[in-house]
Amino acid sequence: MKKLLGLAALAMVASGCVMVGPSNAKSAFTLDVSSPDMAFVDNSVQPLKKGTATSSGIICFVEGDASLKAAMENGGITKVHHVDYKVKNILGIVGSVTTIVWGE
């Protein structure tokens, strides 16, 4: 009985520890999903440059800056055409999210 309670407690603690970024597909076992943010498209700007920013984590520890601002700085972008996201997640244990910004 103690083993069963211990296993249940471990499952509750470990589930959902590393939940990363925006994605159209929600699951505990997401290998590699890319999704565009179509609400943020500016056709007056040319997608000439690409900037990326990534954050990643394992269990309850997450580090990195996947913000739009960081991706823009990394790509030298001042005007944004559109934003894409790339998400990886394995059972809520290991995960990462990458923000990809296209613009000038």
Image (cartoon, rainbow, N blue to C red):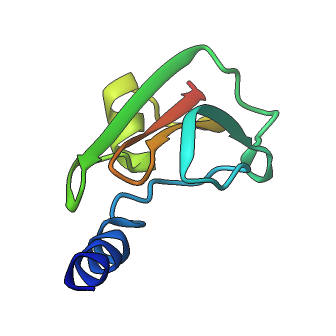
Splitting the image into 4 quarters, where does residue 42 fall?
top right
Residue drawn at (57%, 40%) of the image: 30
Quarter of the image for residue 47 reads top right
Report the side of 32 relative to 6 (left or right). Answer: right
In this view, the residue in front, 82 or 13, is 13
Q: Is residue 60 above or below residue 101?
A: below
Q: Nearer the viewer, residue 8 or 86?
A: 8
Q: Is residue 90 above or below residue 93?
A: above
Residue at 54% x, 53% y is 28
Would you say 15 lies left or right of 63 here? right
| Residue 45 x, y percent position in the rendering | 71, 30
The spot of residue 10 in percent (x, y) is 27, 71
Q: Quadrant of the N terminus?
A: bottom left
Question: Could you say which quadrant of the image residue 2 lies in?
Answer: bottom left
Q: Residue at x 60, y 14 (%)?
A: 48
Comparing 90 with 20, the one in front is 90
Residue at figure coordinates x 82%, y 33% from the top left: 43
**Residue 67 percent across, percent down from the top left:** 39, 50
Closer to the camera in the image, 2 or 29: 2
> In the rendered image, which quarter contains the C terminus?
top right
Percent of width and height locating residue 88: 48, 37
Q: Residue furthest front?
A: 1
